Every structure is written in structure tokens, then in C-alpha cells.
Image (cartoon, rainbow, N blue to C red):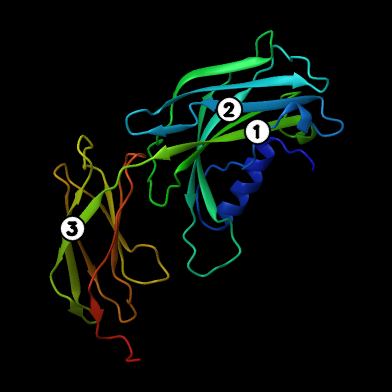
Amino acid sequence: MPRKSLATRLAATAALLLAAGTLSAPAASAQPAKPSDASRGDAYVLTVSTNPTSTSHESRYVDVSGTVTKADGTPAPNIPVTVRQVLRFTTWNPWGDPIDPNYYDTSDLGKPVTDATGTFTIPDVAINASGSSLLNVQREVQISASFDEDGDPNTPQDGYYADTSVATTARSSSVSYKVNKTKVKAGDILTVQGKVTLPKGVEPQGTEVFLQTYWETQYRVRVTAEEDGFFVMSVRVRDYDDTFALRTAPRDLYVTGAHQPLPITNTSLPRT
């Protein structure tokens, strides 16, 4: 299989996502390579792994390490390796179009240099969010490693890439609500007020709350919860609004969001 540099993979995926109107930073999915996996003609083999391989709310740190060896298995010292953390998200796609099912948020972890044994290490890496919205975030975080022999991303034939995944165990959350009416028609103002409840020790302030009113659109209104977890939002009902639901996205990677359908009937919809 032809090898591609990380830069080439990122550029290709970014172009696809920008065309779809989604800003993201992409990653690739592959198991870490082993020396025996080297393709014919490869000058080097790159691996990456973490210890531990899973994290939780109480234990969010891992040590990232890896190796660079030459094709004959001997260590490759003094190789600068770029290491990144990649959050993956599920693309909102109710239409079933053949688009990338994921989008990505990438952050740099460092650029360690291999030692005399061909090993690189970054200790105490926090597996965490980078500040973006966590709506639709997936629970496996990628750690990617790459290097380019001549340092030129425009020559992908001499680039090397490997990645691994870190599992995250998240605690659950909930959302409660009140609505000003359960039967609406086009032109009515629907008001939803409620409260997000997160696990003990996690601040609810900043939790995003999304109101969906139509099946094709993931949300129509977005607000953030106050420091006590309360929120309020209003929307003018359209004659085709048919799917009313709340979704939440806590800012903590180790807390799952909540999904709550709303008992709203739009009387402006055609009778079936």
C-alpha cells in the first residue's frame, strides 16, 4: 500500500471537510506499524503506543512512546517525530450521503527526537479536550506520530506515519426541562427552560445546550448553561418543524452529553 505523509493525509481530508462546510483538523486511522510490517523499499519503520491504553475521569494521563528503526531493524537515532492528539467526531448526516463520517480536532503534543536506541517519549500527556465543542465526540482519542526524511511535506514519498488509540471512560449527565406549550403552530414562540446536571465535582457552567426543531438539521438554537446549570432558549416555530429535542455537550471529555426528545406537536404539519 503506498505510504502517505501526515501532511498529505491532513490536506486531503481538510479539503473534503471544507467543501462540506465543516472546519476541522483531520487524522488517519491505522494500527501502529511493527518492524515486520515494513513495505518493500521503506527506509524506516515508525511505531507509537501509550501506557496506559485507556483513561478515566480520575486518571487522564498517559505516557506516549515509540520507535524509529531502519529497514533492517537497527535503531534510527536523532529523528524528530511530530506527535499529535486527535479528537474524532461523528459527522451529522441524516441523509446518508457518502461523505466522511468523521471530522477531527488536532492538537500538537510535541516533537521529540529519538535517542541512541531509536526511542522517543513524551511523559504525562493529558488526554483531554482542546476547547472546542464536544457535541458528537467519539470516546477513542487518537495519538498520531509522523516524520519526514527531508522535512518537506511536498515530497510525501519519504514520509512515515503511525497512530494508536486511547479509550476514555466517561460518566453520564442529564437534562431536565419545561416548555411553555406542547402544541404549537407556525409563528408561535416556543420557550424551553431547564437545567443540566453533571457528575459531582464537574462544573455545569459552559455546557452547551442545543435545540433541534427539524429532522434535517442537528440543531437550530444553541445556548450555554449558567454556573448553576440553568438555561433558557426560545425559537419561532415554522410550518415544517417536526422534530423537537434537546442535546447537551459538557465541556469535559469524561462526561457524556444527554439527549432528550420534547413532547411538542406542530399542528401546522400536514395530517398523515
Q: Identity of the amino acid at label 2?
A: Ser
Task: Give the residue at mark 3.
Answer: 176
Instruction: Say the numbered circle drawn on residue 32.
Output: 1
> Could you say which quadrant of the image residue 227 lies in?
top left
Q: Is residue 146 left or right of residue 154?
A: left
Up the image or down, 62 lies above or below 189; here it is above
Q: Is residue 79 visible?
A: yes
Question: Distance of mark 3 from mark 2, alpha carbons?
Answer: 41 Å
Residue at 74% over, 34% down: 154
Q: Element type at marker 1?
A: loop
In the image, farthest residue toward the top? 116
Q: Identity of the amino acid at label 3?
A: Ser
Could you say where residue 189 lies in the image, as x and y percent from the top left? Answer: 18, 72
Could you say where residue 167 lies in the image, as x and y percent from the top left? Answer: 47, 38
**Front in this rendered view, residue 3 or 151:** 3
Task: Give the residue at mark 2.
Answer: 49
Residue at 82% over, 23% down: 71
Q: Earlier in the sequence, mark 2 or mark 1?
A: 1
Q: Earlier in the sequence, mark 3 or mark 2?
A: 2
Residue at 17% over, 76% down: 182
Q: Earlier in the sequence, mark 1 or mark 3?
A: 1
Up the image or down, 230 lies above or below 108; here it is below
Q: Tell me the quadrant of the picture where the N terminus can be found.
A: top right
Of circles 3 and 2, the one toward us is 2
How many labels sit on residues? Answer: 3
Residue contact at pointers 2 and 1, CB within 8 angstroms: yes
Q: Element type at marker 2?
A: strand
